[in-house]
């Protein structure tokens, strides 16, 4: 069955409405960056979602890692589901070892 995704994690408007914080943390370098959700909403709109997203590291110049997003109100919670974590792991392994990994 499909994972249950809490409504509060689905959009920028929901995160902002509940005064939740979001932090980008890198998979390779020790860097992290607190995300300005209001500024991001101005760029991409309130319906935009950080859930199941990652981007190339923008925290440390020259880093080859990925920034993943965590909700930081209380205990940090990863903003992705298990299927996405598996897909990212497979893609990363294929970049390093070639396309024979699945």
Image (spheres, rainbow, N blue to C red):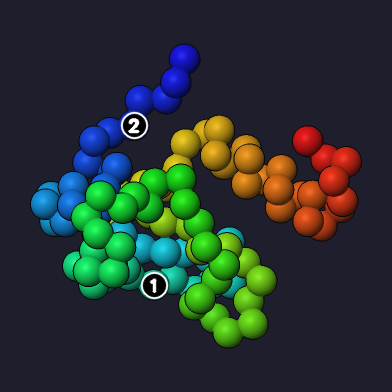
Q: As drawn, is 17 to the left or to the right of 101?
A: left
Mark 2 vs mark 1: which is more N-terminal?
2
Mark 1 residue element? strand
Residue 19: percent from left, percent from top: 14, 56
Neighbor class of circle 2 (other Cα within 10 Å; few <14, some 14-19, many 20+) is few
Residue 6 appears in which quarter of the rendering? top left
> Residue shown at 44%/71% (left/top)?
32
Q: Decide if residue 73 is in sight here.
A: no
Mark sitting on residue 33? 1
Q: Which residue is mark 2?
A: 5
Q: As drawn, is 9 to the left or to the right of 24?
A: left
Residue 41: percent from left, percent from top: 24, 64
Residue 69: percent from left, percent from top: 41, 56
Which residue is situated farthest in the bottom direction here?
61
Q: As drawn, is 36 to the left or to the right of 69?
A: left
Mark sitting on residue 7? none
Count of number-bearing discs: 2
Residue 84: percent from left, percent from top: 55, 39
Residue 37 appears in which quarter of the rendering? bottom left
Instruction: Check contact, mark 2 vs mark 1: CB within 8 A.
Output: no
> Residue shown at 28%/43% (left/top)?
9
User: What's the CA distance linking mark 2 and mark 1?
Assistant: 24 Å
Q: As drawn, is 65 to the left or to the right of 101?
A: left
Disc nearest the viewer among 2 and 1:
2
């Amino acid at each position: 069955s499909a994972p249950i995704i809490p409504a509060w994690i689905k959009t920028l408007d929901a995160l902002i409405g509940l005064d939740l914080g979001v932090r980008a943390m890198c998979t390779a370098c020790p860097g992290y960056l607190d995300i300005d959700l209001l500024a991001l909403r101005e760029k991409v709109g309130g319906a935009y979602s950080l859930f199941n997203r990652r981007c190339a590291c923008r925290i440390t110049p020259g880093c080859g890692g990925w920034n993943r997003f965590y909700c930081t109100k209380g205990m940090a919670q990863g903003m992705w589901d298990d299927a996405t974590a598996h897909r990212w792991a497979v893609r990363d392994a294929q970049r390093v070892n070639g396309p024979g990994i699945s």
